[in-house]
Amino acid sequence: MTFRITRLDEHRQTVLKVDGWLEAEGLPDLEREFDRARGVSPAGLTLDLSGLRQADEAAVELLRRLAAGGARLINCPPYLALRIAPPGRRNGHEAP
């Protein structure tokens, strides 16, 4: 595995911090942790991407789906925010 997930539970909010290189082979681990966290976090779920160094296309697609499903993406590197954003919203640096 080339990435690490750190879970932080703060104020009824769960934050999953993702560090490293996120690639297709590790996505099931991230999805499992996301599902576990979502089950115990009534206020929502946040993914902190400040430590994410690289993401392949499968990872970008998963992040896009999670964001569309209500996950909040924070500290998203600009290069990644542009890849995650839907085509009509690619003029800024904030992830959806």
Image: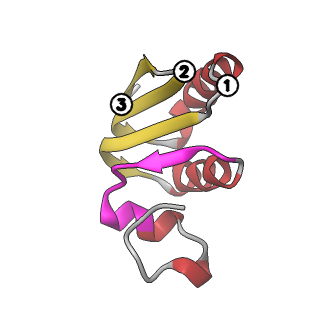
Residue 96 falls in which quadrant of the image?
A: bottom right
Contact (CB < 8 A) between labels 2 and 1? yes
Q: Amino acid at mark 3?
A: Thr
Upstream in the sequence, badge 3 or badge 2?
3
Q: Nearer the viewer, mark 3 or mark 1?
A: 1
The residue that disc 2 covers is 12
Q: CA distance from mark 3 to mark 1?
A: 30 Å
Front residue (pair 74, 4)? 74
Instruction: Measuring from the top left, give residue 22's x and y in whole percent.
Output: 43, 41
Q: Which residues are magenta?
A: 70-81
Question: Does residue 44 lie above or below 91 as drawn?
Answer: above
Q: Position of residue 41 (x, y in %)?
A: 62, 22
Give me the residue at 55% from left, 29% from top.
30
**Disc 1: CA contacts within 10 A as few (<14), some (14-19) or many (>=20):** few
Query: Which numbered dot is residue 2?
Result: 3
| 54 over 91 or under it: above or below | above
Q: Secondary structure at mark 3?
A: loop
Three-letter code, disc 2: Arg
Would you name the residue on which mark 1 appears?
Answer: 42
Q: Earlier in the sequence, mark 3 or mark 1?
A: 3
